[in-house]
Image (tube, helix red, strand yellow):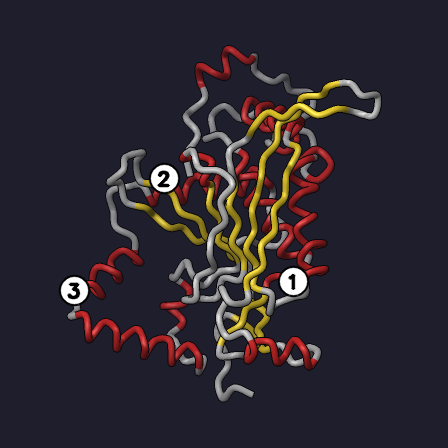
Amino acid sequence: MPLFRRCDGELVKTETPVRTILPYVMRGRNESAIYHEESYDITKTRTWLRDFNRARPERLPAGLFHLFIWACAQGLHKRPELNRFVSGARLYRRKGVFISFAAKKAFKDDAPLVTIKLDFPPVEPFAACVDRINAAIMEGRGPRSSTVDKELALAMALPGWLLSGLMRLLRWLDTLNLKPRFMIEGDPLYTSMFAANLGSVGLDRTYHHLYEEGTASLFAVLGSPRRETTFDRKNQPVSRDILEARWTLDERVADGFYCAASLKIARRIMEDPVAHIGIPAAAAGVPETGALPTSSATTAAAPPTPQL
């Protein structure tokens, strides 16, 4: 039993002996990592997103990554064992659902990355989630430095030996559950899940390691959508839009069967948003009797999609 309580999680006391001993057998997240790949049929989803954006032309549009983030948040709320983490060889149930992701400040090789961490309440409309994500991206790309950037700049001003000692001290405090709350709440590595939209920069079929720092037990990478031709039951060619997601999970937080069943929630939402969010106009907050703008008018008026 730890001497002190964590500010971001509650100790799990009712696990099986096998799962309780796993953090002592597999001490690191990457030593405990399992890898999983999913392919989403987004043929209907792309049409749904197009109509959703047409229904709210005055707002920054939503993309596949917005829907993926919202779907993952729903899954983490419905399957809470996936929202756990290991610290100090003990298993904790996280307080709240948080998802972090990174975005380039500009599409240039030397442009810095901005890392964003958002909390996701149990019930949040998709449109509200899209607006929060876009607002966070626009704020992160602004000229002002974030709190994390300022803290890192201050840390990097220290001599190497002092910085190494400081990092060891912080890890030790984290193990004892004594790391200050403000450092945990503002750190994007203390999160339920880290996501990367590598397809937006032309990378595909990529796995990402877990971070040993922080408490993220999940990492998801979205690739580039592609067109795929298959054959239906009548042996007729059918073209589909396919999006691949590659997952890295910490095996110590839940067994493989539970994890696989949990990831299916995101898959169902990604493949059929109508069944889980509603028709595009209703999801955008437009009355059902309202007509959607025409395609040409929407294209001319719509603001650019924030690239993640």
- Mark sitting on residue 157: 3
Q: Amino acid at mark 1?
A: Pro
| Closer-to-camera residue (81/239) | 239
| Closer-to-camera residue (134/265) | 265
- Mark sitting on residue 80: 1
Q: Amino acid at mark 2?
A: Met
Which circle's residue, 1 or 2, is located before the other in the chain? 1
Which circle's residue, 3 or 2, is located before the other in the chain? 2
> Disc 3 on helix, strand or loop?
loop
Q: Residue at x 50, y 81 (%)?
A: 5
> Disc 1 on helix, strand or loop?
helix
Report the mark closest to the observer, 1 or 2.
1
* Quarter occupied by the N terminus: bottom right
- The CA distance from mark 3 to mark 2 is 28 Å
* Residue located beneath label 2 in the image: 138
| Closer-to-camera residue (111/24) | 24
Q: Quadrant of residue 169?
A: bottom left
Q: Is residue 39 left or right of residue 114?
A: right
Label 3: few (<14), some (14–19) or many (≥20) C-alpha neighbours in 10 Å = few
Label 1: few (<14), some (14–19) or many (≥20) C-alpha neighbours in 10 Å = some
Q: Residue at x 61, y 80 (%)?
A: 21
Measured as percent of width and height from the top left, residue 208 is found at: 47, 52
> Disc 2 on helix, strand or loop?
helix
Check the image and report above or below for 116 versus 131.
below
Q: Is residue 19 left or right of residue 211?
A: right
